[in-house]
Amino acid sequence: MTMLKLRSTARPRQARAPRPAPFHAVPLPLCLAVLCGLLVVVILIAAGVGSVSVSLADSWRIVVGHVTGQGVVVDPALDQIIWNFRIPRVLLAALAGAGLSVAGVVLQALVSNPLADPYILGVSSGGSVGAVVVMAFGAGALGGLGVSTAAFLGAMLAVALVFLLGQQRGRLNPVRLVLSGVAVSYVFTSITSVLQLQAEPNNMRQIMFWLLGSVAGAHWDQLRVAGVVVVAATLLLTLFGRQLNALVTGDESATALGIDVRRLRLVLIVLTSLVAGVLIAVAGGIGFVGLMIPHLVRMAFGSDHRRLLPLAAVVGAIYLVAVDLLSRTLDPPNELPLNILTALFGAPFFIWLMRRDRSMAES
């Protein structure tokens, strides 16, 4: 009887409520100001590190001199190294980190899947096919297109196929969209493998390095297009912050708030695909950034997309600039592809994240 009584009066154990983000109450302008200041410092440090070291003060004077129109204010050789070679590389890394992080935030809300990232739409695999065709067989293989243009067109082709396959009865289905992305990615990856087998041995290193991501060949012309796309798309997507908050709660709740869910999904897919396609065209395949950074920012600053999107952009920029710095300093004069390091950091992070979520659910 005593045991029966204890069983009847015992209360089921409830899951522990998640801890609030430590910086969720800090005003957004203050968070952005601190993070942007850190980004500037990281950029200057990364620009000064290399076979020829340049002090932080000299890097700052060179950048300020060009931005303000004062011209060369230090040794002309150092000026050329910093302004013509290292600053474009570092800025491209920052743009890639920002764009991929923002796209990851949006896609995770769009398909209600915390493991979604920009490459879930087949962007990486599609872009790889276009780039590998040009690198393996020359620009004449695609009518004179360059690597970046071919990669962008391949990425957009993959996204179009995923978009068509992801519709059900004329409406986008998040689950079907994810499955279509996986299927299209496998198909394009297989095509890339076949093309690699037919490529000349001398081209294989270039192909592999591009497939694993690199900003080593960055120049100012690339930055103009990538910068306009990433900055404009980030600003536009931030304006959808309130709608994204509603979308996370479910389609029915979002519709009840007067949101056209179908139109919203279409706009978000177009914007994120454009960002990812442009970045894959100029920087190659860089994984795990769009997966890891959104989770880190949510844990630190909260899940409100009006804060999450701009903060993820800056944190992603800082992260990839630091990763690029490591890629060229761990084994000088050799460079490691970015994807090796992002996977090295990203995989353990997600193992820890899964263990953390499981322990919280069992508490």
Image (cartoon, rainbow, N blue to C red):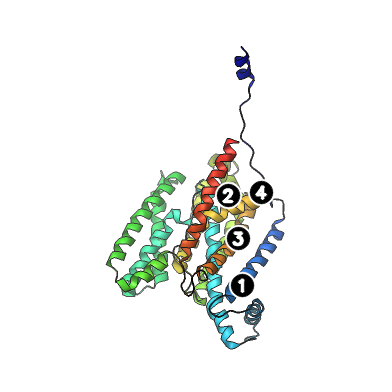
Q: Would you say the residues marked 2 and 3 are in contact, meaning their CB atoms lie under 8 Å apart?
A: no
Tag 4 residue: 21
Badge 1 crowding class, 10 Å Cα cut-off, few under 14, some 14 to 19, many 20 or more, is many
- Depth check, mark 2 against mark 1: the one in front is 1
Q: Give the CA separation, mark 4 to mark 2.
A: 19 Å
The amino acid type found where label 1 is placed reads Ile
Residue underneath mark 1: 45
The secondary structure type at the circle numbered 1 is helix
Q: Is residue 239 left or right of residue 152?
A: right
Separation of marks 4 and 1 at Cα, in angstroms: 30 Å
Residue 30 at x, y percent in the picture: 72, 60
Residue that numbered label 2 is attached to: 244
Query: Could you classify mark 4 by the number of other residues whose Cα lies within 10 Å: few (under 14), some (14-19), or many (20 or more)?
Result: some
| As drawn, 185 above or below 38 | above
Question: Taking the image as drawn, is residue 267 in sight?
Answer: no
First reached walking from the N terminus: tag 2 or tag 1: 1
Numbered disc 3: secondary structure: helix
Q: Residue furthest left?
A: 198
**Residue pointed to by mark 3:** 315
Would you say residue 91 is visible in this rendering? yes
Find residue 192 and report its horizontal and vertical position in percent: 33, 62
Which amino acid is tagged 4? Ala
Q: Regarding mark 4 in the picture, which secondary structure is present there?
A: loop
Mark in the foreground, 4 or 2: 4
- Of labels 4 and 2, earlier in sequence is 4
Cα separation between marks 1 and 3: 16 Å
Residues at marks 4 and 2 touching, judged by CB atoms closer than 8 Å: no
Residue, far bottom:
76
- Residue at (44, 54) in percent of width and height: 121
- Amino acid type, label 2: Leu
